[in-house]
Image (cartoon, helix red, strand yellow):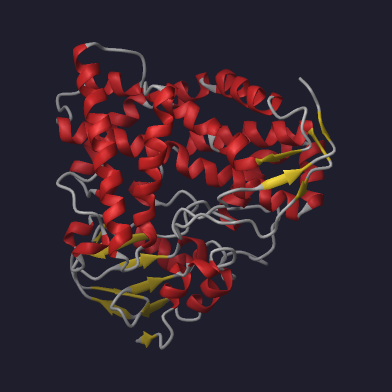
């Protein structure tokens, strides 16, 4: 068994490596299954990550692990942190309302939001991709989709940031306490909103789930709260990173940006998949074995923490030719940017659509864009990895 004398996981968690963790991931792949000195296991190659995602003995429920502090204690985790059968019926209930047709119907409104946001910057020669577009677009969309008042965004933005801060997975008890406070505030807020919607149905996905008549099983109040918090946070945080990482990558590769400008409809779908491989918004996830398992010739005991390094697998040279090269015309991009298996991201189609509209508009309207800071300042979380701000300059912006 490979036991790393240098804790590579701790290096990934260290903020000083946030701008470029990929050399660390390359070192991880030298031994695709490694036991770290702190007792956690790293899985980093493409085939083994794929195997983990499709192994029913690899649980997402960290309450079943031997390290209780790695997940915030809560009586009712959201369905993405539950195993079958409960995961399946909760996910199916949400999916029955969160349909492809609903997402498609959002396109005109998403285009309107992007136009409004860019028009607000049209008289300037610089903007922050995060503050001026990548954050307000998905947060406005998810609020309208769920039926959450957009005016409440300043409140849950603070709580969401506190909650996500706890995903660093280190041993920082202060950060964990702050994350619990954020979680508790979000739960209270959503509980009050759910109670209101139960008394008086309204527009949006939450009300549709609360008043569902198509299924025999219905969510409890606790399940409704955790599902609502999950949809709110996951519905915008991942997309913020995807849009921002996309623009950062494009401005680092001017030829790719020019290709996008000339052929947006032809290039964009594949380009987004390449960004999801090359600079994924979610870098890794966790599993714990329900029984002793052997992976890559290494025995992993029941209840151990397994760090599934999807960003490392996305650059596995055994799977992708020249994996450290950004190629928007790359073929056969089967990445783990949205996870895999039964826990594949439910909101992936919406994130793709929002990113498509945002990048198409930026390519059409920005004249001679350039980075004003490289590398940018990154967010704290090593899991939800993306710039905190991405200031860019440009000669002018076309008015539409």
Q: Quadrant of the C terminus?
A: top right
- Residue placed at 38% from the left, 54% from the top? 165
Q: Quadrant of the N terminus?
A: bottom left
* Number of disc labels: 0
Residue 81 lies, in percent from the top left, at 27, 49
The image quarter containing residue 160 is top left
Nearer to us in this view, 30 or 245: 245
Q: Is residue 306 left or right of residue 28?
A: left
Residue 326 lies, in percent from the top left, at 69, 58
- Residue placed at 70% from the left, 33% from the top? 360
Q: Is there any visible trace of residue 94 in the rendered image?
A: yes
Residue 293 lies, in percent from the top left, at 25, 72
* Residue 350 vertical position relative to residue 102 in the rendered view, above or below: below
Q: Is there any visible trace of residue 328 in the rendered image?
A: no
The image quarter containing residue 285 is bottom left
The image quarter containing residue 258 is top right
- Residue placed at 35% from the left, 80% from the top? 36
């Amino acid at each position: 068994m490979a036991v790393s004398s240098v804790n590579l996981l701790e290096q990934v968690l260290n903020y000083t490596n946030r701008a470029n963790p990929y050399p660390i991931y390359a070192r991880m792949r030298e031994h695709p299954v490694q036991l770290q000195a702190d007792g956690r296991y790293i899985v980093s190659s493409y085939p083994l990550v794929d195997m983990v995602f499709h192994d029913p003995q690899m649980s997402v429920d960290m309450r079943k692990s031997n390290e209780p502090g790695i997940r915030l204690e809560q009586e009712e985790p959201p369905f993405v942190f539950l195993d079958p059968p409960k995961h399946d019926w909760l996910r199916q209930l949400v999916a029955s309302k969160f349909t492809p047709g609903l997402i498609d119907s959002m396109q005109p409104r998403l285009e309107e939001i992007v136009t409004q946001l860019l028009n607000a910057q049209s008289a300037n020669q610089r903007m922050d991709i995060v503050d001026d577009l990548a954050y307000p677009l998905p947060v406005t969309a998810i609020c309208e989709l769920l039926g959450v008042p957009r005016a409440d965004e300043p409140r849950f933005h603070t709580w969401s940031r506190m909650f996500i801060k706890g995903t660093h997975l280190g041993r920082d008890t202060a950060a964990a306490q702050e994350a619990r406070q954020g979680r508790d505030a979000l739960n209270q807020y959503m509980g009050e909103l759910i109670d209101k919607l139960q008394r008086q149905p309204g527009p949006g996905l939450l009300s549709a789930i609360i008043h569902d008549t198509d299924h025999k099983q219905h969510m409890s109040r606790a399940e409704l709260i955790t599902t609502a918090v999950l949809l709110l946070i996951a519905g915008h945080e991942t997309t913020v990173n995807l849009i921002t990482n996309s623009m950062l990558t494009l401005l680092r590769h001017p030829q790719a940006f020019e290709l996008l400008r000339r052929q947006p409809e032809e290039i964009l779908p594949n380009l987004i998949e390449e960004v999801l491989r090359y600079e994924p918004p979610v870098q890794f996830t966790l599993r714990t074995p329900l029984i002793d398992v052997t992976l890559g010739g290494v025995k992993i005991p029941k209840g151990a923490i397994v760090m599934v390094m999807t960003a490392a697998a996305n650059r596995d040279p055994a799977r992708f030719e020249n994996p450290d090269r950004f190629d928007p015309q790359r073929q056969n991009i089967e990445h783990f940017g949205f996870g895999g298996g039964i826990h594949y991201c439910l909101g992936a189609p919406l994130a793709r659509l929002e990113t498509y509209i945002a990048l198409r508009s930026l390519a059409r309207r920005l004249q001679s864009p350039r980075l004003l800071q490289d590398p940018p300042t990154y967010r704290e979380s090593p899991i939800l990895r993306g710039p905190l701000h991405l200031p860019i300059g440009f000669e002018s912006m076309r008015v539409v």
